[in-house]
Amino acid sequence: SAASADDDDDDDDDDIEVSASVFLKKAEPAPESKKLAKKQEEEEDEDDDDDDEDWGTPSDESDSESDDDDSKYTSLAHKFLKKQPTEDEKRAADRKRDDKMKKRMERKDKKKNEDEDEEDNEGGEWKPVKGGAPMVSEKPKMFAKGTEINHTVVLKKLNEILQARGKKGTDRAAQIEMLTELCTISVAHNLGEGIMLKIKFNIVASLYDYNPNLASCMKQDMWRKCLGCVDNLLDILFECPNIFIGENIGEDSENLSNAEQPYRVRGCILTLVERMDEEFTKIMQSTDPHSQEYVENLKDESRVCQIVERLQRYLEMKGSTEEICRVYLRRIMHTYYKFDYKAHQRQQPPADQSKSEQDQTESEAEDSGLLMDRLCKYIYAKDRTDRIRTCAILCHIYHHALHNRWFQARDLMLMSHLQDNIQHADPPVQILYNRTMVQLGICAFRQGMIKDAHNALLDIQSSGRAKELLGQGLLMRNMQERNQEQEKIEKRRQIPFHMHINLELLECVYLVSAMLLEIPYMAGHEFDARRRMISKQFHHQLRVGERQPLLGPPESMREHVVAASKSMKMGDWKTCNNYIINEKMNAKVWDLFPGADRVREMLVRKIQEESLRTYLFTYSSVYDSISMHTLADMFELEIHIVHSIISKMIINEELMASLDQPTQTVVMHRTEPTSLQNMALQLAEKLGNLVENNERVFDLKQGTYSGYFSRGEGEREE
């Protein structure tokens, strides 16, 4: 402000007065000299306040006055005060005067801006001002004026910039800006692709180092710069085939200037792309999956996949076998979880589509199954590391299962023997294994193989930690078992939201599979004391449903399954079907399947068949014989399907009956015991178990004596 500037001027004048008083302590000047000194100070103050253009040094004025008035001063002190200033005093006076002039100019500019603002406001409208005066961004000055720009000078400057990398207090943004400007200078002076590639490698590395916290993701502006730089690197490598890059190239053996020979640059483009892929994963992990921002960030995946595909083409030409396997795995990891709708449409073409149109569709669409098959088989044959091969096998199985290729997925899982040693793998591979087993079980369910589906999903669902085992979140109840560092590590292992498996769909598939297996088994072994539970979680849901004092219409998915189980236990397949397949269950579960109508048809057929088995187990003791046509009408099944189900039950000794083929009748043998006999058998079996346990405990306590007597008997026999 103007007031502060005036205060500064006053402070400067006070300094002059204090310095002068020091000299005045040595000898008291005459009254005339005091008046002259006071007059001179007033003239200097007037010169400071006026806006004259005379910036001459005060030494000239003092020299002229000393020549004119030298005869007036007779004492030694007067002569001392008027002596010639030294060079240091001149420079100090010049600096002080320049500072004052600078302050005057700033006051002028500020007053001018205030006047302009007042004129604008007098027009009746206020004009918004954004943050004051705009900042003028100046490019960093890399070289002194007149410096000849060549490879040596640019490399020296590059090394100077890189030496500050990682040091405390280094401005990372300024470092990136300086490297970018250095790259621009090298391009402007045609220093060749070698030096430009070297600088761009370091630009991408500096972008990765900009954020020192490894747990957090890159900012959006840095992420965009990173994608652009990696794309530019690949452009240079494709345009200039005479460039060789690699981590095995030493700094001394680099060729950055001699264009007659192939350029040799130290650096690994594969490592940069892998780090870029990891940064994209961190960006998706740190974004709210239910926000529009997540959708916008997910659009970058197509560009990431394009960069990985371009790198794949480059390494197929110039890369080693190990590098090709690594980039193939990156391509696989971006492909295995995506459902190929074009391939699904080719498997089920519309009825009104002609043969020629189907062939054209097949030629236009790229089949992801063929791509996965080619990439994975190369890794199976060439890879020397177990981890890459294991990940490729699991991704291949996942992709087969996702596209209903059940037998290929099952055979590949059995041949790999991954179940034997997967517990020794690192956590990300274990998460991938769990995801693959879940997808395998869901595929078996869609194919109607209920037992295989239940076995594949049993380990995940019985643990009660499906969310954590699939890498889709952390359980709150286990928060106390881990410290803060472990929590950060586990959060970095989480799968992005767009790759998640629907947990409600998973639980519904498991519970429905358990229902179709458990209810007929419970009906057939109702009085068996050694009856085992097929699914503990399913029995837990049944007990929860039985504890409820008031039973209303089911609302949640679990309540629908429990209600359907009770209906199936009574042999009422229609009510069971209504609970499993309705509008709520369709919206929550069944409509999420590709080919949802086919899945619903399979479910209806399985419910009819298992309800028939349950009915025969439950009510066989009531009938002497029953017609298969009657059973077919009751469960709306074809007669040959009823015949097949009953024949299997008889062969497996589950149903004591025989078939009368001429009359299509099931004749019951009535070999089942009555309820009293069943209770007596259970009591006898429990008493037998009690006796065995008692004898075992007695042998443990009396083992010494029994051994002694047995040895004595043996000796006597001898």
Image (cartoon, rainbow, N blue to C red):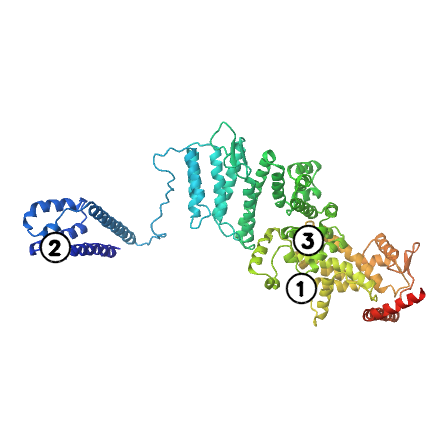
Q: Amino acid at mark 2?
A: Lys
- Residue situated in front as seen by the camera: 50 or 122: 50
Say left or right for 224 vs 346. left
Whichever of callouts 3 and 2 sits on the residue coming sooner in the sequence is 2
> Of the numbered discs in the image, which one, if any, rests on residue 65?
none
Residue at label 2? 38
Q: Look at mark 1 in the image and give the residue it sits on.
A: 555
The residue depicted at 62 percent of the width and 38 percent of the height is 324
Mark whose residue sits in front, 3 or 1: 3
- Choose between 679 and 17: the one closer to the eye: 17
- The vertical placement of 500 against 54, above or below, is below
Residue at which label 3 appears: 423
Q: Quadrant of the C terminus?
A: bottom right
Whether residue 527 is visible: yes
Q: Amino acid at mark 1?
A: Glu
Q: Which of the two marks, 2 or 1, is nearer to us in this view?
A: 2
